[in-house]
Amino acid sequence: MDNNNELKLWYDKQADAPIFNEKNLLETDEFNQYDNNWDSQGLPIGNGNVGGMVFGRTDKEIVQINEITLWSGGPNKNDYPIDNYYDNKEGKYTGGNRKDAHLVLKEIREKLFCGDISGAESLQEQLTGYRTGWESYQNLGEIAIEFLNDSKICEPVNYKRELDLRQGLIKVSYENEGRETLYKREYFCSFPDNVMVIHLTAAGKHKVEFSLDLKFDDRNSRYEKISKTNISYRSSKNKITGKGMVTDSKMLFETQIMVTADSGAIVTAKSDGSLQVENAADVMILMSSKTDFKNENHLVSSIDNYPEFKGSNPHSYVTKIIEKAAVKSFNELLSIHLEDYSHLFKRTEVSFGSQFPQVTTDKLLDSYGSDENNSRYLEELLFQYGRYLLISSSRNSLPANLQGLWNDSNIPPWGSDYHFDVNVQMCYWHSCVANISETVIPLIDMIHSYINPGKVTAKEHYGVDNGGWVINAQTNPFGFTAVGYDYVWGWTPGSAAWVCQNLWDYYLFTEDKTLLKSKIYETMKGQALFWKGFLITDPNTGELVTAPSTSPEHGRIGIGSTYDMVMAYICMKNVIKASEILGVDKDFRDELNIIIGKMQPLKIGKSGQIKEWREEEHYNKYENGEDIGDPNHRHISHLLALFPGDLITDETKDYMDAAIKTLDLRSKEPGFGSGGWGLANRANLRARTHQGNEAYENLYQLIKNGINMNLLSYIPDICGFFQIDANFGLTSAVCEMLIQSHAGYIELLPALPRNWEQGHFKGFKARGNIEIDCEWNKYKINRVNVTSNGGHIIKLKYKDISKCDVTSNGKTIKYKVVSEDLIEFKTNKNKVYEITLN
Ligand code: FUC
């Protein structure tokens, strides 16, 4: 048996069988339709297009499968039910937009500017959009492998199941009860070949024998009793072809499964559409799947006329893909996959000095906090898991959604959609610093595709008709950009500016001017245009403000909440920089400079806090002492200037102190749902305040109470189902604790906690396309290697760094001492610089 278990999730037991086929078909509550075994025990594989959850069972193996574009909802159904105030009264899809919703804006603004909050509140629901057609990401189905005869094993011996993060590969191995046969399996999703590969072998007395079924999940979706129609399965020779249509979106999908086996094996196509495999020593199962969904920056001619988001029938694509893959041997497919996957994965290393512990992952998790060495190792493993999961769910199709690309339900929590009031942004925080910036490209494409639909929302809901675009809290892949159907969480224009920060960071880290020019700048500029159109002068102060405004998911309507003021400000500031880099739009840049000059995005309140709302005096209170929102709320959107923004740094001490105060006040008691991503968010914020121990404490709580046995994250007090953002936020927090580069210099170990006394990291990226390796012991850095891919001046901040030696290729490099803790030196492109500290 393979004893090298490093960077693997591994178990000596099978996962409990998934039970998703036994769920109540009429259950339409998204918070009840989930399967605990799937959530907590399945092991995920994926290539950004297709993915699966693997259980490693020895009697009947189930591989639950997904295709990332398979969605219900959208523009191709025109008789959506009309039961609620948030349903479009004609049953039609309008991207969520309510025609002329903006007409009430004038009155709301007048009321707000004369302090009549209740009056404005009584009108706020008129600004909201429809829910109609938002819908959800869908489960595709399962590949069922029912073992037959001697190969059906109920009590396996020497059982092992593992997910190898270095290889992006699952392995299962076991022997039969009499130990006469060793069974082995491998599972992976290849990005270059765009197939899922399952390989089964038997060595010894018995063979592998099974019947193989493809089963689409047609349990009900929210509005359809049968979520998939026109389903057909056909098997011929060694291939199963399954097709169907998502009932309400009319989206066509096709899945093909091809079996190749050794010459002694018999593969029989059955009349029910299944395949039977007998007498095999070596079998490979390939799965390819695709829908006819097509995403691009579709023109939306009017609110009543949404494009279909339809490309060609997937049949010929899937056929070609499977046939191309089937001529390759398993070893060939595997080596192509390994080359592609490990090219991304192997770029970084993190160690907190742990010795690799020989304990299974479930035991590792149980020992977290009580065994020092195990705890350090688990933190390293989780760091890498966040990278694995993003590489596996975000390659060249749609970006990672609330569950990455893994979903076993047709009514998943929150539609397993794209939530932009923190969740999607968090999914990508680590992408660049953890050196997998390629994974951001699907996000860039998707946000670019919102420009045209988002113009409709800007016009109908915000009264902005200048070519600017906006999205709000929740979106789907069919250009759903409207304000959500409840004002308190639904009205979040800051979400659009916030995700533009992810796009801008992609540029800052990679300096990829091609993408900046082709998509990123156009997207950011369109957002800046929106703010230009929406900001209004507050007659009481003369400042430019957002009105109405809110802070995500709680509190009352108001003027200029910090959330959208900060994000609007940062977005425009970034557009100014981007336009300078590209040498375009000088006049627009000048205009933006004037606009941001009239804004005051951050205000400090009487408790010494960063105000969340402009109307806030003491923390979370109006002047009259009434609460505005929830003092312990999970969202902490008024600190976006600290992270991921760059307005609060060491150079702005008053704001930094106020940010710390805010974090302390917000952390007094855990608010509802503040586990999971909420803790990951706080850890990133505490890293930026240089409070390593506090950041660590958040991560500790997250790992203790928000990570399942399969290391996928969940929010403990909201039903406990899987939501992927905290996995990604955790990886980001680790990065932010070890390196930061947002303030014009690279700061090393800015928030090192007590528990990470020694360690190293390799291959982290800093803004300016710089790669950094760093090694420390007894909390002190010994050595740093800097690879200057961009060839710029490099500034490094670290305690007493002015006493270091810098060399390159054995030659001493002179540097300028800016202060005791900050140095700078010129670099040449692609050269490596070694910094030693004594
Ligand atoms: C936001 C959060 C919730 C949840 C949802 C998907 O609305 O406030 O906690 O994460 O997104």
Image (cartoon, grey):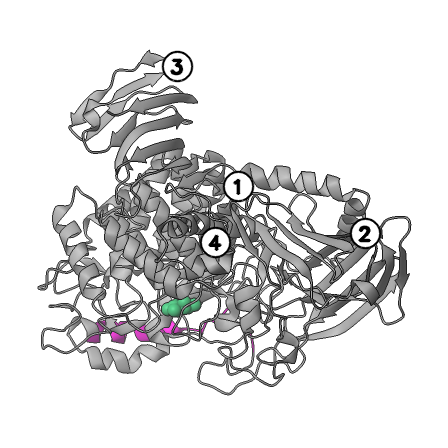
Q: How crowded is mark 2: few (under 14 residues within 10 Å), some or many (20 or more)?
A: few
- Looking at the rendered image, the disc whose residue lies closer to the viewer, 2 or 1, is 2
Gap between marks 1 and 4, in whole Å?
A: 25 Å
Residue 768 in percent (x, y) is at 37, 33
819 drawn magenta: no
Viewer-nearest of discs 4 and 2: 2
The amino acid type, in three-letter code, at marker 2 is Gly
Q: Residues within 10 Å of mark 3 (few under 14, many from 20)?
A: few
Q: Confirm whether residue 464 shows in the render.
A: no
x, y percent for residue 167? 59, 44
Where 688 falls versus 62 (above or below)? above
Which amino acid does the dot numbered 1 rest on?
Answer: Phe
**Sooner in the amino-acid sequence: mark 1 or mark 3:** 1
Q: Is mark 2 on a helix, strand or loop?
A: strand
Q: Earlier in the sequence, mark 4 or mark 2?
A: 2
Closer to the observer: label 3 or label 4? 3
Q: What span is in magenta? A: 92-111
Does residue 439 appear left or right of residue 113 in this picture? right
| Residue highlighted by disc 1 | 345
Question: Marks 2 and 3, how far apart in space?
Answer: 56 Å
Task: Using the numbered discs, state the Cα–Cα distance from disc 4 to disc 2 in whole angstroms.
Answer: 54 Å
